[in-house]
Image (spheres, helix red, strand yellow):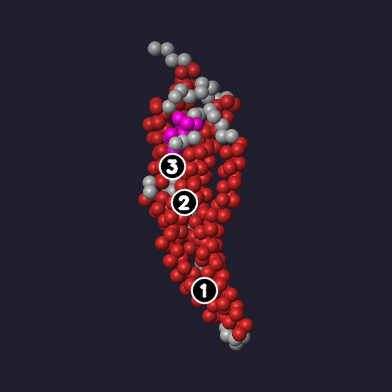
Amino acid sequence: MLVSEQDIMQFINQYYLPFIRIGAMFMVAPIFSARIVNARLRLVLALVLGVIVAPLLPPMPSVPLFSLQSIALIVQEMLIGVVVGFVFQVVFQVFVLSGQYMAMKMGLGFASMNDPTNGVQTTVLSQFFLMLVTLMFIAINGHLILISTVIDSFTTFPIGNALPAAALFDVVKLGGWMFASALVIALPVLTALLFVNIAFGVMSRAAPQLNIFAVGFPFTLIMGLILIWLGLNGFVERFTNVADYGFLFIHDMLGVQ
């Protein structure tokens, strides 16, 4: 049995290139990319999925493993995986940002804690929303849908195809969508607290001897917490709308049904 160098390269590409796309997604996607998840575990998961999926895929492009063409393919596959994971990082950050908006208006901006997922300082309210979103994402099997989408993309967006510039520009525009969506989620609380602050402003003019800071701060904080508690009734619907937009964005970009 004779095995040529080209056959060896084809065999390596058949398993290596799918591993790159899946591994890049695991390194960036929420939950999988958390600091509490060991990097070796992500690599093992990507390797197992790559080994399972690779025999089911069409033949890979036959290029030398150590060449500029091979490097270009690796960069393309890495970019696709990173974009898929990044889109859902933006989805999660919508709720983190809305928590920041509410916390600043309530006077909870100073109450920050370390985020074990990203290793940065965030407000307590943002951390609370991030925990809710993470649990709900797992409850709807969002992590499995994300993996399934990446695997299906090998059929609809084969290896060797590069993301068009328009798709990358749409990813950049997700930043504006993130800020707008976070503002829409936080708007009811912000509007109600604005009227509370206006009422205290009128009271300070009517009774200048009233210590508005001693009275207004705790009242604003309590009102903000009550409004957030009342707003949790519609939190599932808001999360569903934002998550659906993220999945539809990825499906449209990669052509997955």
What segment is highlighted magenta in the picture? 149-157
Secondary structure category for the residue under label 3: helix
- Residue at left offset 47%, top offset 15%: 4
Residue 94 visible in the shown view: yes
Q: Nearer the viewer, mark 2 or mark 1?
A: 2
For the C terminus, the quadrant is top left
Magenta highlight on residue 155: yes
Under circle 2, the secondary element is helix
Could you tell me residue 74's position as x and y percent?
54, 31
- 244 and 144: which one is in front? 244
Spatial separation of the CA atoms under disc 3 and disc 2: 16 Å
Q: Indicate the amino acid at tag 3.
A: Leu
Q: Is residue 206 magenta?
A: no
Q: Are marks 2 and 1 in contact (CB under 8 Å)?
A: no
Q: Position of residue 254 (x, y in %)?
A: 50, 36
Q: Residue at x 39, y 12 (%)?
A: 1
What amino acid type should be assigned to the residue bearing mark 1?
A: Thr
N-term mark: 3 or 2: 3
Label disc, if present, on residue 241 of the rendered structure: 2
**Pair 3/2: label in front:** 2
First in sequence: mark 1 vs mark 3: 3
Earlier residue among tags 2 and 1: 1
Residue ID at (46%, 18%): 7
The 10 Å Cα crowd at callout 2, few under 14, some 14 to 19, many 20 or more, is few
Q: Residue under circle 3? A: 146
